[in-house]
Image (tube, rainbow, N blue to C red):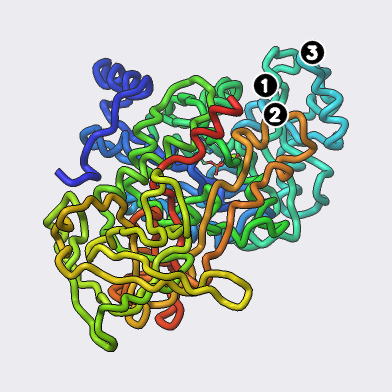
Amino acid sequence: MSELETKSPGNFIRQIIDGDLKAGKHDGRVHTRFPPEPNGYLHIGHAKSICLNFGVARDYQSGKCNLRFDDTNPHKENIEYVDAIIDDVKWLGFDWQDRLFYASDYFQQLHDYALELIKAGKAYVCDLTAEEVRDYRGTLTEPGKASPYSNRTVEENLDLFRRMKAGEYEDGTRVLRARIDMASPNMNMRDPTLYRIRHGVIHHQTGEAWCIYPMYDFTHPISDALEGITHSLCTLEFEDHRPLYDWVLNNISIASHPQQIEFSRLNLQYTVVSKRKLTQLVDEGHVSGWGDPRMPTLAGLRRRGYTSSSIREFCDRIGVTKAENSVEMGILEACIREDLDRNAPRAMAVLDPLKVVIENFPEGETQQLEAPNHPKDEGMGKRTIAFTRELYIDRADFREQASRKYKRLVTDGEVRLRNAYVIKCNQVINGPDGEIVELRCSYDAETLGANPQGRKVRGVIHWVSAPEGIPAEIRLYDRLFGHPTPDGDKGVRSFLEHLNPDSFKVAGNAVVEPGLAQAEPGANYQFEREGYFCLDQQDSKATRLVFNRTVTLRDSWQKIDRQKG
Ligand code: ATP
Ligand code: MG
């Protein structure tokens, strides 16, 4: 069974569906949809909804899931977002087959259902301004007042609605409203707006065909019903809209009646998952774009080096409930760490190079050493790495003096070079300002794959051949925010104050082992002792390799979280 065929764990929604199937509801069908609005890129919160909707379709016999663009706000939407969403859902591993729809496909039908409501006296054209509508609506504790226009005759309403559609009125001068109950304790039922006027926007699907656009609460139930959706899964903020969802379907001539079920949104610590806030980060230049590797968008996570299977695993792990909570970033990071620990080949990269000269190794000679691509998986094969007289090690792996706890290289001390020999540092060469520029070392030719005779060498450090290694830029990404709930902190004026100034650093003079010249864009590696990295899909060139740090080897934030918590 391929990974994509494995079932997701049970949850309350699957229990409801099981019950419905037993009871023979919805003709025994299971049909869901994922309905993004193309007004931004998909983020990790959407992944939860995608995995839920497409996962249900996958796990139930004859289950289906539609991808539907909820595109009724043309002034905020565009085709770039449509394309990005399509790519992201595919990348996440799901397939809608021939069931890609747009709510705008239904503009004519929606209009005709609006006419039905008008003819039944259940909708009217209202001339109140937006502000007046708000005043008339009342509050949570006070009932609303009827609009002075709510008693227009059917003929008058039909005529006004026709003229709204014909473009005779300006934006904001009239709306079509449902006539329900201005005294309802549920504010959504106090004569909600069904249609508004929008001139001067070119809709990415329908162009200039329409100047009236239906509202979400009217569009959504009808789109669901037209597509034969059985279970319309949405986030909890729509719970109060469910009576309106049902009202719309109960008051038009549509047979199908999908059932809306709400679950809690994903909130993820150390980031924000709201398109509005993500848009702000992009527009104000706090990140390089929607696909910035620090963004919680699927495009950003992908560029950062997250695999789609790690994100599906994350969604399975967090589960689906009605409880609002904020998930630890550590859970997402653990999913990618576990995936890459298992599946990423190992390689060596020196981020901050310090030259080492092996004085007893012949000049100009290259010895090809073998190294396993994975310490626990022989099936991943072996590679060769060049050993030469001049090498680089990381500056952090040498100290002139150190206590015995420091298990790396010290003057007159020995250390093992990973996959190679034990070396000893004999002399430190300093530059004019006293900085260390080179280490003179010697190697023990008897220690390749063997312990040295008569002494113990405990430390192991990574290295790269100086003449054979390839220069690279390594981008060190970290969490975008330094606070677990940047948008939940009342102590600051804006969530932007919690941006982590250290979320992006560059190791510009890194050197990587020669085999990485063949790395494919996006390919994941563990750089031994450094973390998990991938070849950047956008900026890496044959002449200048660029790697992104996906995640460190261990969770260094846990300590910080504990101190704060
Ligand atoms: P945002 O508030 O970020 O704009 P949205 O809900 O307006 O999100 P849509 O494009 O309308 O974004 O969402 C498409 C689907 O994804 C909806 O069914 C929505 O409920 C779901 N969704 C959006 N954000 C989350 C989240 N954080 N967790 C779970 N599901 C989400
Ligand atoms: Mg929305």
Task: Residue at 83%, 36% (x, y): give it.
Answer: 130
* Crowd band around label 2 with a 10 angstrom C-alpha radius: few (<14), some (14–19), many (20+): many
For the image shown, how many numbered marks are present on the structure? Answer: 3
Task: Confirm or reject: label 3 Cβ below 8 Å from ligand 2.
Answer: no
Q: Quadrant for the N terminus, please.
A: top left
Q: Amino acid at mark 2?
A: Pro
Q: Would residue 475 be found to the left or right of residue 55 on screen?
A: right
> Do the numbered discs 3 and 2 sit on residues whose CB atoms are within 8 Å?
no
Q: Amino acid at mark 1?
A: Met
Task: Residue at 48%, 41% (x, y): give it.
Answer: 556
> Do the numbered discs 1 and 2 sit on residues whose CB atoms are within 8 Å?
yes
Q: In terms of sequence position, does the residue under pointer 3 or pointer 1 come before the other?
A: 3
- Element class at badge 2: loop
Distance from the alpha carbon under mark 3 to that under mark 1: 11 Å
Task: Residue at 15%, 57% (x, y): give it.
Answer: 453
The answer to whether one can see residue 239 in this image is: yes
Q: Amino acid at mark 3?
A: Pro
Residue 56 in picture, x, y percent from top left: 31, 34
Distance from the alpha carbon under mark 3 to that under mark 2: 14 Å
Residue receiving disc 1 = 189
Query: Which residue occupies the foreground of this view, 478 or 54?
Result: 478
Q: Which mark is residue 143?
A: 3
Residue receiving disc 2 = 192
Residue 91 in picture, x, y percent from top left: 37, 55
Residue 523 in picture, x, y percent from top left: 33, 63
- Element class at badge 1: helix
